[in-house]
């Protein structure tokens, strides 16, 4: 989150494109592989760390998650999960849930459904439906074909949950050879 804040607050990136800077600080694309994909997905879905550093979640325009693990609460890999979470990190189920992008995506889907229901009852007299804003940036979910079947399944489930929450998602299983 601090790296994102550093780029976001860089005065050289104040909403303009020049030849001597990286781009627009209000149009960030986050790219991460494996645990990096997991962490960036978590940041894009749970804004508390960005908010604490004064970064607007709206600055994130896309997330590219390459073989990131979308949940630490999956029943698909109990021995690995137990070893990683309990033995190495000292987490319990509550902590694992708080650090799982899939859990946050599901919570956002529920909040979005509640917002839609509230908006449906408050449509204006002309019949214009209130617009519910997207809850997250555009997502590219890439997973290698040689990854464990459980990780590929979790990636598909994460993409489906993001789509239910109103996010645009491209899910791609990358073959062994391009």
Image: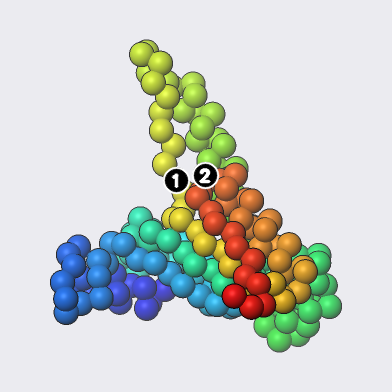
Label 1: few (<14), some or many (≥20) within 10 Å?
A: few
Q: Which structural element holds mark 1?
A: loop
Do the residues under discs 1 and 2 have CB atoms within 8 angstroms? yes
The residue sitting at 60% across, 63% down in the picture is: 172
Answer whether residue 110 is visible to the viewer in this image. Answer: yes
Q: Looking at the rendering, in which quadrant would you find the N terminus?
A: bottom left
- Quarter assignment of residue 127: top left
Q: Is residue 21 left or right of residue 141?
A: left
Q: Which structural element holds mark 2?
A: loop
Q: Nearer the viewer, residue 109 or 152?
A: 152
Mark 1 or 2 closer to N-term? 1
The residue sitting at 36% across, 13% down in the picture is: 126
Q: How is the image coloured?
A: rainbow
Q: Nearer the viewer, residue 125 or 156?
A: 156
Answer whether residue 99 is visible to the viewer in this image. Answer: no
Numbered badge on residue 134:
1
The residue sitting at 50% across, 50% down in the picture is: 168
Numbered badge on residue 166:
2
The image shows residue 162 at horizontal and vertical percentages of 57, 52
- Quarter assignment of residue 27: bottom left
- Quarter assignment of residue 3: bottom left
View extreme (top): residue: 125
The residue sitting at 53% across, 41% down in the picture is: 112
Q: What is the CA distance from the residue labelled 1 to the residue labelled 2?
A: 6 Å
């Amino acid at each position: 989150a601090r790296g994102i804040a550093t780029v976001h607050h860089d005065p050289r990136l104040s909403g303009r494109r020049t030849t001597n800077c990286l781009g627009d600080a209000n149009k960030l694309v986050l790219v991460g592989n494996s645990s990096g994909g997991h962490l960036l997905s978590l940041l894009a879905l749970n804004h508390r760390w960005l908010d604490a550093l004064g970064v607007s979640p709206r600055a994130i325009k896309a997330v590219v998650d390459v073989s990131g693990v979308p949940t630490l609460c999956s029943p698909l890999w109990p021995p690995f999960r137990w070893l990683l979470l309990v033995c190495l990190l000292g987490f319990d189920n509550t902590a694992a849930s708080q650090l799982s992008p899939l859990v946050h995506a599901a919570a956002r889907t529920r909040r979005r459904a509640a917002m839609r229901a509230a908006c449906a009852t408050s449509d204006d007299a002309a019949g214009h439906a209130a617009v519910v804003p997207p809850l997250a940036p555009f997502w590219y979910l890439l997973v290698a074909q040689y990854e464990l079947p459980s990780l590929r399944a979790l990636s598909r489930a994460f993409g489906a949950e993001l789509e239910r929450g109103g996010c645009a998602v491209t899910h791609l299983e990358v073959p062994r050879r391009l």
